[in-house]
Amino acid sequence: MRKEKEIEVISFDMDGTLIPKDFADDFWLKKIPHLYSQKTSLPKKEARERFIEEYDEMGRDDIRWYEPEYWFSKYELEQEPREVLEKLRTKYELYDDAKEVIKKLHEKYSLIIISNGIKMFIEVGLGGFQTYFTALYSSVSDFRMSKKTPCLYREICKKLDVEPEKVIHVGDDRENDHVPAKKAGMRSYLVSRNEKNNNELNDLRELLEIL
Ligand SMILES: [Mg+2]
């Protein structure tokens, strides 16, 4: 059997992996429509429907879809996106298993984030936990790519000067995390907190047993 290379770097996705997806969803689907409704005096429901219609129409292949600055400027919202996000962050916590695992793994490995949320979401999402990470990569902010492709994962390995075989990537999305990271040559684990499936992590603490 081929001997596996010793792991040096552990990469995590952000939404749904370290922090509940509700954090970002709340920002996009509640907070922006709410500010839009305040700005225009449109009833909340109507403001929300109008925003979601435009948001969906643009679609996730357009880089602007991911950028709060674009939407704040489009709707002439006076607030600072980062301040709005930071305020919202007080309602959310990283998952308990994520906090525990980050603290343990950072003693032995370089920890990084590879997310397709913009950099601000990673920074605000991690809060004080940022100190445990050696690098934060956003496909949108750093590479102007809306999807996480094998090429992106390889590019990040190059930047870190590490062989993909020495990197583990953990994420909750098959198409953006598991498949492309594996294709790039990394060891890849899919985390699915809700279902019990073989070969998937239901809790990040299972990583501690694997390593
Ligand atoms: Mg995710």
Image: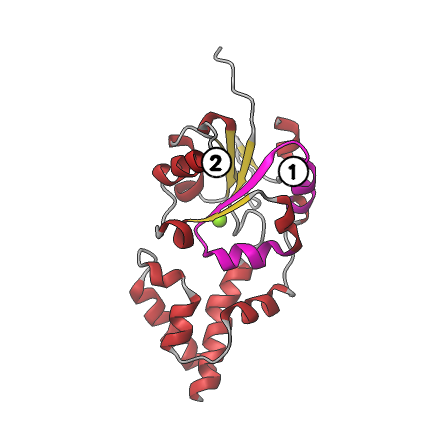
Quarter occupied by residue 86: bottom right
Range covered by the magenta-colored residues: 98-127
Tag 1 residue: 106
- Disc 1/disc 2 C-alpha distance (Å): 16 Å
Q: Residue furthest top?
A: 1
Residue occupying image coordinates x 56% and y 46%: 194
* Amino acid type, mark 1: His
Tag 2 residue: 160
Say what secondary structure mark 1 lies in: loop
Say what secondary structure mark 2 lies in: helix
Q: Is residue 99 magenta?
A: yes
Q: Residues within 10 Å of mark 1 (few under 14, many from 20)?
A: some
Quarter occupied by residue 71: bottom left
Give how far across and how far down residue 190 sits, in percent.
50, 38
Residue occupying image coordinates x 65% and y 50%: 129
Which callout, 1 or 2, points to the residue nearer the camera? 2
Residue occupying image coordinates x 39% and y 75%: 73
> How is the protein colored in the picture?
secondary structure
Quarter occupied by residue 204: top right
Say if 65 sits above or below 96 in the image: below
Which badge, 1 or 2, comes first in the chain's sequence? 1
Q: Residue furthest bottom?
A: 41
Please state which of residues 179 and 193 is positioned toward the viewer in this rendering: 179
Please state which of residues 34 and 196 is positioned toward the viewer in this rendering: 34
Give how far across and how far down residue 141 sits, in percent.
41, 55
Is the residue indicated by label 2 positioned so its CB lies within 8 Å of ligand 1? no
Is the residue indicated by label 1 positioned so its CB lies within 8 Å of ligand 1? no
Give how far across and how far down residue 131 sits, in percent.
64, 48
Give how far across and how far down residue 111 sits, in percent.
58, 39
